[in-house]
Amino acid sequence: MSKDAFSGYHPTVNMLYFTLVIGLTMCLNHPVCLAMSLLCALTYSIDLKGKKAVRFNLIFMLPLLVMTALINPAFSHQGVTILTYLPSGNPLTLESILYGIFAAFLLITVIAWFSCFNAVMTGDKFVYLFGRIIPALSLILSMSLRLAPRFTAQTKVISNAQKCVGRDVSNGGIFKRARHGIKILSVLVTWTLENAIDTADSMKSRGYGLPGRTAFSIYRFDRRDKKALLFLLLCGGGIITGAVFGKLKFVYMPIVSGAAFDIGQAVLFALYLALCAMPMIINGRERVKWKKIQPCPERGRRLLTSKD
């Protein structure tokens, strides 16, 4: 069984899902929606990447969260609830602090969703979705998505090769290390440009982007994808409709206020949570099915004992 069952869905379903969750996360200011989106984004990223995602969240996301939360009240002084005055004489308001915390969590939530997007939406899915509509742009996007992991892997290869001849960044003094680092970077940039030219020439020789050209595809839009697409349209349409009518309205400036809680808002929260948690629900259901079809060792031993 694949570790992520949601990645096996049709690229249209994957693309629509990330378009909805990332778009709604950036457009909705309600803290409850942000909390649900952040929780689902971090859970899904850990489900996809395991310990690597945990390490990334602790090393990069946590300092970014603290830094962003502190920057806003230091430079923005809007709001009516003045807590104290800074040494510069500007007021420190409760609203600016709350908005800074919201902006910090929003930033790391969007980054977490894009890390999941990068893991699920591979280059071949981009080419499949946009190859006939915008072939040049789809090729550039697919190359850009795979650039970072290939860049990192090639850096290790070049660094190990330079280390064998004593020209690694760990050899010599400060200036010598800097010179070795520049040399490695130069080789890496040259490799990247040559690889991009080779890829473009290869795709051109295969007739990529020519009108009427057909292409093999492993993706088939089946009944499972239809159900997922319908679920996304219903959840997304309901949330957008509720947001348009002000059910998810929330403002931080000049005073913190939001729409009154009622049954309609509770339904929208449930739809939003179901939308964000869709990959985890699918993965959990597939894992339960997988465990059910696995043979039970204890049952097998009992059968063998009874035969004996």
Image (tube, rainbow, N blue to C red):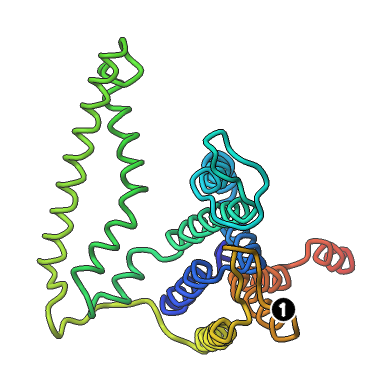
Residue 55 appears in the figure:
no
**Which quarter of the figure is the N terminus placed in?**
bottom right
Residue 193 appears in the figure:
yes
Q: Which residue is the site of mark 1?
A: 260
Q: Nearer the viewer, residue 305 or 35?
A: 35
Total marks placed: 1
Relative vertical location of residue 107 with respect to residue 54 in this rendering, above or below = below
Q: Residue placed at 65% from the left, 64% from the top?
A: 256
Dot 1, how many residues are within 10 Å of its Cα: few (below 14), some (14-19), or many (20+)? few
Picture quadrant where residue 303 is located:
bottom right
Q: From the viewer's perspective, tell me whether residue 293 is left or right of residue 242.
A: right
Q: Nearer the viewer, residue 169 or 212?
A: 169
Location of residue 178 in the rendering, given as x and y in whole percent from the top left corner: 27, 20
**Which quarter of the figure is the C terminus placed in?**
bottom right
Q: Secondary structure at mark 1?
A: loop
Location of residue 304 in the rendering, given as x and y in whole percent from the top left corner: 83, 65
Q: Residue placed at 52% from the left, 46% from the top?
A: 68
Relative vertical location of residue 170 with respect to residue 52 in this rendering, above or below = above
Relative vertical location of residue 48 with respect to residue 23 in this rendering, above or below = above
Relative vertical location of residue 125 with respect to residue 173 in this rendering, above or below = below
Residue type beneath disc 1: Ala
Picture quadrant where residue 10 is located:
bottom left
Q: Nearer the viewer, residue 91 or 28?
A: 91
Q: Residue placed at 38% from the left, 64% from the top?
A: 122
Location of residue 253 in the rendering, given as x and y in whole percent from the top left corner: 57, 63
Location of residue 216 in the rendering, given as x and y in whole percent from the top left corner: 28, 77
